[in-house]
Amino acid sequence: MSASADPDSAPRRLPVWVLVGIGLAALVVAVLVVVVATRLLSQRPTVLLGPTPAEALVPGACLAEPDADLAQYTTVWCDGAHAQQVFAVADLTLDPAVLGSDDQTLTRYGDELCARYLEYSVYLSDAVDADSRDDYRVQVLAVPARADYDAGAHSAVCSISAADGSDLTQDLYRPMG
């Protein structure tokens, strides 16, 4: 009897239940990969490069200009040299009695909020730790004008830069979540 005629030498097929189980396991893995990838990508806001109005800045945006009071900034790649980086949104909602009529109240309040974020390393990467905090300074950007504030615009953004005025060369933003 030849080897090809031997019934024990015929290739064995896996049972249908095993094939179905392998298919379901592959489907579950694929769904988990999509869910994890979506979660990771959704934690960080999309940052568009180039000219960006101050009120459209989002955490994670790296800026070419060091100024705090521009109407428009140039967003650049964070892995290259940049003057400052947006790292948080500051809620400037104040009681009207505290707000008063001083135009600088919102800026001072925003600067204090940003300073607390730096103090506690909120929204900042591990590169900004207790030993290096003095190497950085923070400021509030995109503070709404009083008329805009009265109309409901109560948000500004916090930015971080090197205390000595040198360029940053890494991404310092850490999404919370």
Image: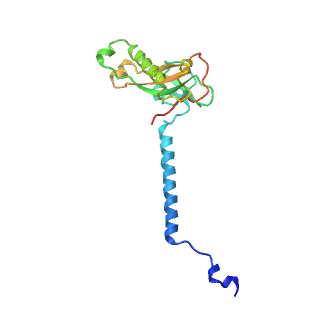
Left or right placement of residue 20 versus residue 92 in this view: right
Residue that sits furthest to the top in the current view: 102
In the rendered image, the vertical position of residue 39 relative to residue 88, given as above or below: below
Residue 168 % position (x, y): 60, 24
Residue drawn at x 36%, y 22% is: 149
The image quadrant where one finds the N terminus is bottom right
Relative image position of residue 46 (x, y in whole percent): 50, 36
Q: Nearer the viewer, residue 13 or 1?
A: 1
**Residue occupying image coordinates x 37% and y 18%:** 146
Image height check: is 26 above or below 41?
below
Q: Position of residue 67 (x, y in %)?
A: 53, 18
In the rendered image of this protein, does residue 177 appear above or below residue 72? below
Residue furthest to the bottom: 1
Outermost residue toward the left in this view: 97
Task: State the quadrant of the C terminus.
Answer: top left
Image x and y of residue 45, in percent: 48, 36
